Image (cartoon, rainbow, N blue to C red):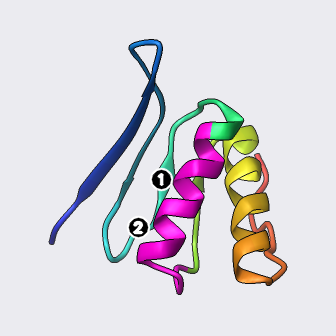
Amino acid sequence: MTTTFYCMVEDDKPVPAEMFTKDIWPLLTEGADEAARLLARYLFSKFPTAKNLNGSKNTSLSFVEEWEALSRCNLEINMNS
């Protein structure tokens, strides 16, 4: 199984880090809203049929808002904690 890690850097700090495999896609750490949106744009261009997201609530919501705009689909929260 291949695992890929992505990380954006702002002011020499990672914001946010993300990883995914074919089975776990993506897993976000907490980070800046704009970084989550940029990551969503990049991953949507590579993997537009992704179906799941795991991560901290605020970062995930920023990612999902961008993904919804790109995919023109409404996403659903299945677990909110």
Up/down of 47 relative to 81, above or below = below
Up/down of 1 relative to 30, above or below = below
Q: What amino acid is labelled 2 in the image?
A: Ile
Q: Quadrant of residue 30?
A: top right
Q: Left or right: where does residue 68 sit relative to residue 2?
A: right
User: Is residue 44 inside the magenta stretch?
Assistant: yes
Secondary structure at numbered mark 2: loop
**Mark 2 touching mark 1, by CB under 8 A?**
yes
Secondary structure at numbered mark 1: strand
Q: Which mark is residue 27?
A: 1
Q: Which mark is residue 36?
A: none
User: Is residue 24 inside the magenta stretch?
Assistant: no
Residue under pointer 2: 24
Up/down of 10 relative to 31, above or below = above
Q: Left or right: where does residue 75 sit relative to residue 32?
A: right
The crowd level at tag 2 (other Cα within 10 Å; few <14, some 14-19, many 20+) is some
